[in-house]
């Protein structure tokens, strides 16, 4: 079972992922929690370069290629082995982030980005899209730390990302669930965990 958490900056997805991890671990589900970029040792180095506001790329597609390299290594060394052990993998961002950020956000070439994205052939069983207004998300991001290279982009960039997430959610309505995070952390968590548990039970996973 492969579950991804997606959303714009400050959407609250990482907070919810942490709470889901605690809850599902306590209940004895066999879970593995990971993230992109930065799910492997190589990925941690790639992540530092990608997020550092001082990084300047000289080629239009260097950023995209680093995300793809991070994902290829992550999938082969962490995600696929965990799935073959029947673990429930919870991943903070995945292929939908590349479509939202590098295709819609950066306005890269569609054919190129889709074909590079498809170097990784697995797709999530379920995607939880944490959704809030861009202003809400950015004010949360500003309150928690210095803005990274993506958070520091202009509003039009964030708007293109959010629009793309909504488009993807419509296109892949079989796996996408939109959860509004314009609510308290606890209310959002209750919605998230009931969605997850229902999906896990359907797939035959039960607490132990
Ligand atoms: P992170 O701190 O994990 O962001 P957040 O807390 O919002 O999840 O940083 C990951 C950043 O990388 C985030 O701004 C989105 C961006 N990103 C892409 O642009 N493309 C991708 O394919 C992925 C996985 C992430």
Image (tube, rainbow, N blue to C red):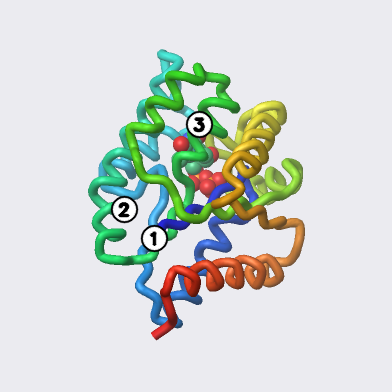
**Element assignment for label 1:** strand
Q: Secondary structure at mark 3?
A: loop
Whether label 2 touches label 1, CB < 8 Å: yes
Find out whether the residues at labels 2 and 3 contact each other: C-beta distance under 8 Å.
Answer: no
Q: Is residue 92 left or right of residue 106?
A: left
Q: Residue at point 65% right, 42% down? A: 170
Reading the image, the residue beneath label 3 is: 53
Instruction: Characterize the local packing of mark 3: few (<14), some (14-19) or many (20 or more) Cα atoms within 10 angstroms.
Output: some
Report the disc number at residue 79.
Answer: 2
Q: Is residue 19 visible?
A: no
Q: Position of residue 208 (x, y in %)?
A: 39, 85
CB at mark 2 closer than 8 A to ligand 1? no
**Residue 31 x/y as whole percent:** 37, 68
Number of other residues with Cα within 10 Å of mark 2, as a class: few under 14, some 14 to 19, many 20 or more: many
The answer for how far apart the CA atoms under marks 2 and 3 are is 29 Å
Q: Is residue 183 above or below residue 161?
A: below
Looking at the image, is mark 2 or mark 3 nearer the viewer?
2
Q: Which residue in the rendered view is the most extreme toward the bottom?
A: 208
Instruction: Judge depth for marks 3 and 1 and give the one in front.
Output: 1
Residue at 30%, 46% in the rendered image? 75
Q: How far apart are the alpha carbons under marks 3 and 1?
A: 30 Å
User: Which residue bears the numbered disc 1?
Assistant: 89
**Is residue 132 shown left or right of residue 32?**
right
């Amino acid at each position: 079972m492969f579950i991804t958490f997606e959303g714009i900056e400050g959407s609250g997805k990482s907070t919810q992922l942490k709470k889901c991890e605690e809850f599902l671990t306590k209940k004895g589900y066999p879970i593995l929690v990971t993230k992109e970029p930065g799910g492997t040792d190589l990925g941690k180095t790639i992540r530092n370069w990608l997020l550092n506001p001082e990084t300047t790329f000289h080629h239009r597609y260097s950023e995209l290629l680093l995300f793809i390299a991070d994902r290829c290594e992550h999938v082969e060394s962490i995600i696929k082995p965990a799935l073959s052990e029947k673990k429930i993998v919870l991943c903070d961002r995945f292929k939908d982030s590349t479509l939202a950020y590098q295709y819609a956000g950066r306005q890269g070439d569609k054919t190129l980005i889709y074909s590079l994205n498809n170097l990784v052939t697995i797709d999530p069983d379920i995607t939880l899209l944490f959704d809030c207004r861009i202003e809400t998300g950015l004010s949360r991001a500003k309150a928690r730390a210095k803005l990274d290279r993506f958070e520091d982009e202009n509003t039009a960039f964030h708007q293109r990302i959010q629009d793309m997430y909504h488009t993807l959610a419509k296109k892949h309505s079989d796996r996408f669930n939109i959860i509004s995070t314009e609510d308290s952390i606890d209310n959002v968590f209750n919605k998230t965990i009931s969605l997850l548990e229902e999906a896990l039970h359907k797939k035959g996973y039960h607490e132990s």
